[in-house]
Amino acid sequence: MALIDHVPDEPSLNESDSSELESIDAEELPVCVALVDVTGTNLTRVIHSLTCK
Amino acid sequence: MTGDKLLTSAVIDSLTAAVTVLPDTCLFGLVSFSDHIDVWDLRHATPVTNHVPVYDISLMTGVIDSPAVDVEFEEVLQPDEFFVPVRQFKANIFTAINSLASLNDEHLARNESDTPKRALGTAVKYVLDFVTSYEDLVNVRLLTFTSGACNWGLGKVSVGQTDLLPKTSFYRTMVRATHRLCPDSVITQAEQAASKNVAIDVTALRRDVHQQLGLASLKFLCSRTGGHLRLYDHATVTTLATDLYVPRCI
């Protein structure tokens, strides 16, 4: 069973942001995905501690 | 980034530069990886990450193409949640990118007793399976940053005395695709990407000239998808951001 943990108490989207997302037509839009190696950084530890409470 | 402040700073600057030159209509998503994968939710002002464990199944089964992740990307975030338009969420994107720097800890990395686990191959496959499963996503650029050889999950690269020959066929030859469009087909990572107009850039950063990163194996991701393979070290990394600050990212 995998764990998918979300950091709690985050602000939710406001209405204007939601409407912007719903209006997106992904067809033909350029898309960029950044895949970043964080091995050995403190980020790994911090995220782990946040998600494994 | 292995805790190296100079290399970390270069990644932050180059990512910032890359996002800066993205067109406003572009959709952007951020994924980080180490011994697991973190899928970032950029809709929030404060970065929110979703933790996805990566298993090294080959240690238990000896089967190299066994799934290393048992949760679908869509179970973590839907496309309209993961991808955010640059125009509306540029500030959130920059906050997330900068958080990589603020949390870096060189001292921690230097004192790691074990070799840090790096699930690069699994992370690439995880993102590729996701973006290639949607017909609407036809113009995708995958900017990949790595600072070491993959040593966990799929596509592990054994480090030998030379880095000239491919150490694994994972990135080049047949792997079993698991995405929804062709669950039973067998295609290569690069073919899977190129068939959906996904170009893969791999930017490799090394601490010294003797560090091996498995570029002979990774190069197929770039050479067969129209992407760029870049290699930097401490002496050359200062040009990384300007190299990416070119309006050809997409």
Image (cartoon, coloured by chain):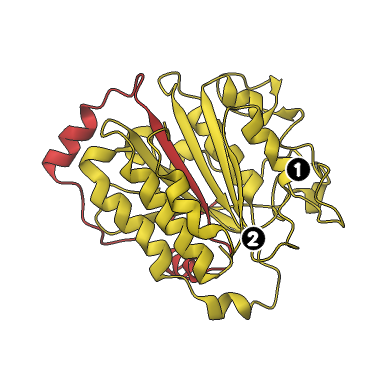
Chain colours: A red, B yellow
- Residue A12 location in percent, x, y? 21, 51
Side of B118 where B5 appears, left or right:
left
Q: Are marks 2 and 1 on the same chain?
A: yes
Q: What residue sits 58% from the left and 23% below the top?
A: B194
Q: Secondary structure at mark 2?
A: loop
User: Which of the numbered marks, if any, corresponds to residue B159?
Assistant: none
Q: Does B144 sit above or below residue A42?
A: above
Q: Nearer the viewer, residue A38 or A53?
A: A38
- Residue B172 location in percent, x, y? 74, 32
Q: Which residue is mark 1?
A: B216
Image quadrant in which you'd find residue B176: top right
Q: Which residue is mark 2?
A: B206
Q: Chain of mark 2?
A: B
How far, Cα to Cα, is label 2 from label 1? 15 Å
- Residue B109 location in percent, x, y? 59, 74
Q: What residue sits 34% from the left and 34% below the top?
A: B27
Q: Amino acid at mark 2?
A: Arg
